Amino acid sequence: MYIRYYGFKEKPFNITSDPSFFFLSKRHKEAIACVSYGIKERKGIITLTGEIGTGKTTLCRSLLAQLDKSIKTSVVLNPYFSDVQLLEFIVQDFGIKIKRRSRLHIINELNTFLLHESSLGNNAVIIIDEAQNLTIRQLEQIRLLSNLETDKEKLLQIVLVGQPELRDKLNLYQLRQIKQRVMVDYHIEPLAQDELTQYIRHRVTIALQPQNEKKVSFSEDAVTAIFKFSQGIPRLINLICERALLLGFIQEKNIIGETIISTCIKDITIK
């Protein structure tokens, strides 16, 4: 409804993980640098955590787009599998064809694949999103996968991406072996208040039709109210800004002020 009114080609504040809208905050830059380092330097197990809505999945998709073609990838977006099914999914995502569904056969085929890629100078990485949902058995299986190595380097890098509960799980006594193998660990914090205006401007600019001038802006009071509501969490920022643009369209406003934001916050909290 408001897209044409404001001159957008698409909605600027969708809550989907669209890497074209990815905003590189200071924390997100650090996160990408740490994970990239862990992958390229073959550090084995890497953990990336953050609260719900802090942009972990979008960051991973942006990271995947930046990786060199010599890095083969397998991405698990939802690990709700048995430990054997998880192995099957990983090898199939690498393009490996398996003849039998036994754990030993799958790991042998994966090891053969990794040795071949290493001989070509290539690397391999598994990225598991929502990793806080991994069972203890699955995490133990991941630890065993991290044993795939030559005398000089790890053949497989494993990035575990999840909510802070992942850290709690890895602190369990029975998982102390995998905890000791985490070589790179980063926790994403929400956006700082002084980054919020940049974030909103960034998304609005990307969503504009080519050659269109910006037809909407957010006042300083509005930005302050958005930060107070969202505490810098991108998903909540998107939620409130999406509603604010719709209400601004209805009221024919090109400046989104604090009154509009307050109305939207009341609507959300009442529901």
Image (tube, grey):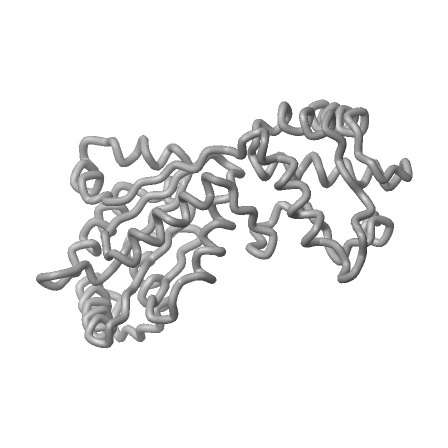
Q: Say which quadrant the C terminus sits in.
A: top right
Q: Which residue corresponds to the image point at 56% horizontal and 50% vertical from the top-left?
A: 22
Left or right: 162 in relation to 17: left
Task: Give the x, y percent position of residue 264.
Answer: 76, 29
Q: Residue furthest left?
A: 151
Residue 111 to residue 33: above or below: below
Figure label count: 0
Residue 109 to residue 134: above or below: below
Left or right: 145 in relation to 209: left
Task: Give the x, y percent position of residue 62.
Answer: 49, 56
| Residue sitting nearer the eye, 249 or 104 | 249
Task: Give the x, y percent position of residue 242.
Answer: 72, 41
| Residue sitting nearer the eye, 164 or 28 | 28
Left or right: 10 in relation to 106: right
Q: Which residue corresponds to the image point at 35% horizontal and 37% vertical from the top-left?
A: 166
Task: Give the x, y percent position of residue 145.
Answer: 21, 56
Residue 149 found in image quarter:
bottom left
Q: Which residue corresponds to the image point at 82% horizontal and 53% vertical from the top-left?
A: 7
Residue 48 found in image quarter:
top left
Q: Which residue corresponds to the image point at 27% horizontal and 70% vertical from the top-left?
A: 122
Q: Residue furthest right?
A: 252
| Residue sitting nearer the eye, 142 or 255 | 255
